[in-house]
Image: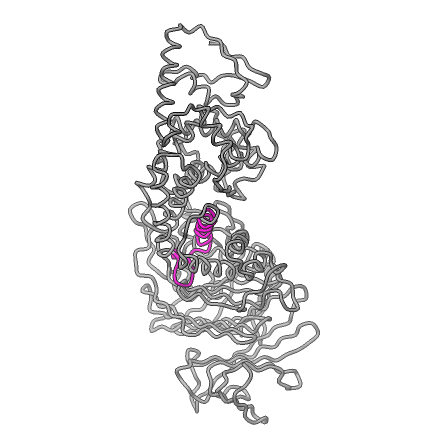
Amino acid sequence: MAVTRSAGFLTTRKRLCSSGSSLHRALKTTRGMELMNITLTSTMPRERRAVISESERCDSKRKLNIFRRPYCDWTPDAILTHYKSRTGIRYFPVLDREQTTRSVIDNILFNRFELTGESHQLPPDFDWTVNPSQDLEWLIMLHKFYYAVGLGAAYHETGDQRYVEKWIELTSSWIDTVPIGFPSGDAVGRRIQNWIFAHYYFVTLDETSRLPADFYLSFLDSIYHQVNHLRGHLTPARNHRTIELYAIFLAAVVFPELQGADAWLAFAREELVKNIHTDLLADGVHCELSTDYHHVVLKNILGVRRLALLNDIAIPEETDVLIRKGLEFAAYVHKPDGLIPSLSDGDTGSALDLLADGYDLYQDEALLYVASRGRRGTPPACRSKGFPDGGYHILRSGWGNGSEPFEDERYLVFDCGPLGRGNHGHLDLLSFEMAAYGQSLVVDPGRYVYDESGGTNWRVLFRGTGYHNTVQVDKKNQTRYALGKNSFKIQGPEPDRELKEQITGANYDYLRGVARSDEYDAVHERRIFFFAPEYWIVSDIMRAEETHDYDLLFHLSGLASDNVSVTRSEKALVVDSPHLVMAQPTDPEVQVFVEDGFVSHTYGVKHPAPVLRFARRAADASFHTVLYPFKATRPQITVEAMPVWHGARQCLPSEALALSVAVTRDGQRFQDYYFSADPKQRRDYRFGPFTYNGSLLFIRDTPAGRTVDIRTEPTAELTIRGAGALVGSKT
């Protein structure tokens, strides 16, 4: 056989006429061939050519059986012409930003695949079932075909035929050599989605493209069989099921000409509605309690909802109500810089485009406001908000609708929720992330990888309690997490949790949560007070019968690498890092260490970042930490513990605590007083010059002793020595 073609052809594949492959199939998978500019001459006997031609006709006839009438009687060319020219079917592509950048896609042209933080050069005729990485996620990502959508977008933008050729080459190779259900249901669902999104660029938008009709028929045939396989092998629940059902729904909408498409649509619609109501909790948070997976699921749900709207497919009103709650959580959990925290398994990143989609669907001005980062729309009604079913509580200084820009607002998200369904929860009860002035300052380090191979089990490390901003007891996890048959599994009950108080006032917030673990007898109580918009006070109170090693951990961002200093004085222990001052009362029993750690914003990629560890050995212990963020000028902070008395007895911190915080900022000096007590114990407490019978109090005085701010309960009575009593003070 001889092959001639226009300039640019290099060589045919060695196995072009290998046993078991037709001439047509070999040409489809020849790397780099410009399929529309090939001239064939052959010395093959006429009888053999007739056999191959008949085989191809039979193959085409079989594939045409996937269509309902009248399409099953058409030729492959007529099928392609129909799909290029039809109207009435409305759909849209969805591109993964990281997987479809031009540099990533241009590398695909040369079989350089950058997936899960690793780059691998694959040979021209690579085996799809062989993984060049130790991490299974790499192979799974290869089979999800995100790059197919990127090839389509690049072709649409440039008209460069190389992108079409690569799409045909990779897709044909996969069809010819890979079992339909490989490697998993989640990958099948994603692959179907991405093939259809690529179809949008290569077929729907491009009526003039010269796709081979037989390739296109094989493409549709593969989608048809993948959808039928997927319907029979659906994941039982959670994010994978949502992805898979969206794939079936999408295929039914885009390809109604296929046999069974009506049944696909009815099935997918019904099951999606059930799945949405099963997977989104009553407050809208996704049941796996990962901020990343919440947005993954929300993205798919919104894709379904937009498709339904565009194609007049009814969705129940109560489902829309729940979707809007999911969007509300998404709006609140985004940090002022437009990124989400990576709580439990997942990456950081922005999902503001989903809020924009939500606005388009529901005309919610608050979604538009957050999506545009305060440039359009109306701010959300609440400054801070809790989501009790998911266990996440977000404290904000504002929405950029006051004297400060949207990006400069202060933000903290607190986790007082369960591990979540499935296997994505981290052992991070009572942890938090904090951001201010466009920077994440105290961070959740993320997930890094799922792979557990290698000398260091990074999966276990990043998931463990020690990689979160909470108190670790005796270096243990909050839940038993041990090696199972093949990998580490949660093998004990998750810790008991209770959010005892959540209070939001005009310019303050207060949270009080408690964690009890089966792994040790120590009980951890965390109290967070936010004097908005300035600073937080975090009190950690540990109670136990036995002596333990307590480590209070704060993971700082990479911005703080090699830029952390610790200063001890008689009045305070102060830690300085970029844009953040942290201060604790001086306690000779507490040691502080600046240690090496990591943060991971993207799967497979980690960066060095420091970890602060405040250590103490005791049965009962308490840590009180002021976190004061700043934009440019560093404030001066000192903090002292004040003994609290009830009658002649000094109270334990678990009963009542008080702090004196001295703040010097922008040429102003203030003396702040903070008091917190168990609200079930209504008593008269004495601390410093104050007598108080409530459970929460914040006072700001000037150096001259003039009180400029009081935050307290409306019914509590406060007496200041020399000033008399105040009742029903400002809240």
Question: Do we see residue 447 in this rendering?
Answer: no
Q: Quadrant of residue 263?
A: top left
Residue 417, relative to residue 700: is it above or below? Answer: above
Q: Quadrant of residue 501?
A: bottom left
For this view, does 102 lie left or right of residue 459?
A: right
For this view, does 434 lie left or right of residue 314?
A: right
Would residue 512 be counted in the magenta stretch? no
Would residue 296 be counted in the magenta stretch? yes
Q: Is the image coloured rainbow, by chain, by secondary structure, or in one colour?
A: one colour
Look at 54% across and 68% down and name the residue there.
381
Look at 38% across and 25% down and name the residue there.
73
Q: Which residue is the extreme one toward the right?
A: 667
- Residue extent of the magenta highlight: 280-307
How far across and down, in percent of the image, does residue 604 sit? 48, 45
Please state which of residues 450 and 310 is positioned toward the viewer in this rendering: 310
Quadrant in which the C terminus appears: bottom right
For this view, does 182 lie left or right of residue 170?
A: left
Question: Do we see residue 211 in this rendering?
Answer: yes
Q: Main secondary structure of the magenta part?
A: helix
Q: Total of numbered circles in the picture?
A: 0
Residue 279, relative to residue 52: is it above or below? Answer: below
Q: Which residue is the extreme one toward the left?
A: 485
How far across and down, in percent of the image, does residue 265 sit? 37, 43
How far across and down, in percent of the image, does residue 8 sit? 58, 19
Look at 44% across and 65% down and name the residue there.
387
How far across and down, in percent of the image, does residue 308 sit? 44, 48
Please state which of residues 331 and 270 is positioned toward the viewer in this rendering: 270
